Every structure is written in C-alpha cells, then in structure tokens.
Amino acid sequence: MPLSPLLSIILSSLLLKSVIAGDGFCSAPSVIAAGSNSRPLYSKVTDPTLSPSHLEDLPGFTRSVYARDHALITPESHVFSPLPDWINTLGAYLITPAMGSHFAMYLVKMQENSISGLPPHDVERFVFVVQGTVTFTNATGISGKLVVDSYAYLPPNSEHSFKCDASATLAIIERRYAYVGSHITEQIVGSTDKQPLLETPGEVFELRKLLPTSTPYDFNIHIMDFQPGEFLNVKEVHYNQHGLLLLEGQGIYRLGKNWYPVQAGDVIWMAPFVPQWYAALGKTRSRYLLYKDVNRNPL
Ligand SMILES: *[C@@H]1O[C@H](CO)[C@@H](O)[C@H](O)[C@H]1NC(C)=O
C-alpha cells in the first residue's frame, strides 16, 4: 500500500533529523572521526577487546589456534611471567622455535624501575614500543627516549639496555643472526612515521619498512596499513616465514584452508609456504607489524 504523502513527509523529516543529530543508523563513526579520537595509538594491543563479548566468559573458549604451519595467538591466551635477565618485567613468548619458527616474538610489560636483559650470544634484537616510554642506552653510553611507534634494532652481541620508570609495553623479535661473508649490521633507531611509504605495485595497502634492505640484514619489519574493505591482491605462498602483530583494526586472515576473524592484539605465526591473505574489515584502519626473513639463501 503506498504511504500517504503526509506520512512520508513526516518520516523523511524524522530521518533527516536523526542524520543531523548523528544518533540514527548513520551514526557509525567515520574512519576520519575514529582516527582522531583521543585513545592512545595501539591501545587495543594493551587493552584488547576479548570479543566476541558473549563468548568472553565461556569456560574453555579461545580464538587461539596452533597448527603445523600457522598459529593464531589471541590476547586471552597470552601468559605473562617474569623474564630471565630482566628486572621488574613480565614477558609473554608468542612465537618461538618450538612452533617451527627460526625467530622468537614476545610482548614485554615493563613496570616501575625496570631494566632489560641482553639476548643470547649471536642473537639480534628488534624492539618496537607499543605503549609508554623507555630509555635506550648503548655501549657508547648514548641514550635517548623511545616513545610509542618508535623502534630499535640491535646487532648481535651489542651491549645495550632499555629502562623504564613507569610502564611500557614492547613487542620484541629476536633471531640468531645468519652471518654471511664479512657483512655486519648496525644499530638502527627510528620511528614508523618517519619511514617513507614504498611502492606496492598492484596492491592498495600502504607499506613502510623499518630496517635497511641491504644484504647484512637477514630480516625486515614491515608496517602495513589497510583501510576498511581493502585486501591483499596477491594470495601469497612463499619460502619466507612471518610473525605478525595486529596493532590496529580487525579483519579476516586466511591461513591455509582456514579463515580467521582477527583483531588488534592478535599475533600470527606463518610457516614457510602457508597460503596467506588478509582483508581489512570493521570501521577503522588495520595496521600490522610483520617480521619477514630476507637476503639469505634458503640452502
Ligand atoms: C650508540 O648510539 C649512537 C647514536 O645512535 C651511535 O652513533 C653509536 O654508534 C652507537 N654505539 C654503538 C656501539 O652501536
């Protein structure tokens, strides 16, 4: 039955009102509005949503998965314990060689008056600040503050320390350095937003690399940004392995024949040759930090 003209005028004026008031079905925050709110950058990593909320308290429920060629380690299954050689610091190892990786990835929570320990002999270290501020000091005695979104790479066997007076969360990646010829790596200290956007032919995501691409470096760290609805064109299957920390946003990660809903705070291990693909969903930007081994002959 057709609506009477009067009724449709009333309806459309109500609709207009709710659009203007921003309280109707059009009130979902825009990408721009969501990006400009006052929540600290990467707060979802330290304060994750343990959703789906109706399953949060379900005994035995976890989204974490551990398979032969991949793992998804979600925040409700992170287990923090004191780190050997660190003071006043808790750590959760999320990817380790026990899974098949040749690197380790862990989150550390530095507390008041905390100090880092050193990695084992011949192990290189990459540190990314997720929350808080740390003071970095190296063998030369040069020190500086690292804030959220900044990072440091330490070559194997280089003396250094991270100190924290209040609280800080770091994502750390370590690997036994693969020496080749007489190459050596150098200390790198930088900040994500200072790294140039790189060309990504055929792709829409934004890519930054945090380490030099030259031969001495046996891995790189990519920061990849996707707007909601964007996805990887390439369905990658390759010899490199990956460790991924989703810093912001949510989406679907394909790993082999599995399709996982993922969100900020989730960590993924990808073994060599596992088919992999990502689509960003939700209402805000997806950003992830990705370890990738490079520059070495696999034989
Ligand atoms: C310590 O850091 C400074 C400043 O980044 C750098 O110039 C120096 O080479 C570093 N020392 C060592 C031993 O890496």
Image (cartoon, rainbow, N blue to C red):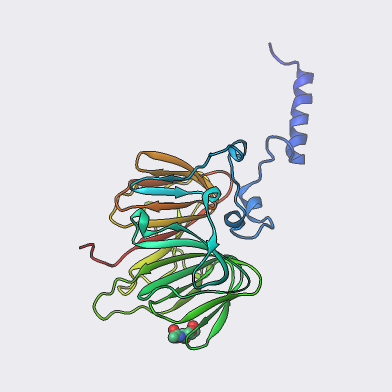
Where is the C terminus found, in terms of image quarters? bottom left
Which percent across, then down, holds residue 235?
34, 46
Q: Is residue 233 visible?
A: no
Give the residue furthest to the left.
299
Q: Is residue 213 above or below residue 251?
A: below
Residue 54 x, y percent position in the rendering: 62, 36
State left or right for residue 109 relative to residue 7: left
Measuring 29% from the left and 50% from the top, which residue is drawn there?
273
Indicate whether 260 appears above or below 200.
Answer: above
Q: Quadrant of the N terminus?
A: top right
Residue 262 or residue 83, whichever sits in front: 83
- Left or right for 139, reference 297: right
Across and down, in percent, residue 162 comes to 54, 76
Task: Report the front residue among 24 and 277.
Answer: 277
Quadrant housing residue 43: bottom right
Spot occupied by residue 62 in the image (x, y as percentages of width and height): 52, 42
Residue at the limit of the structure toward the top, as seen here: 1
Foreground of the two, 109 or 36: 109
From the viewer's perspective, is residue 59 above or below residue 180? Answer: above
The image quadrant that residue 8 belongs to is top right
Eyeballing the image, is 34 above or below 17?
below
Would you say residue 176 is visible in this rendering? Answer: yes
Q: Nearer the viewer, residue 142 or 194?
A: 142
So how many labels did they put on this image? Answer: 0
Kindly give the residue lying farthest to the bottom in the view shown: 140
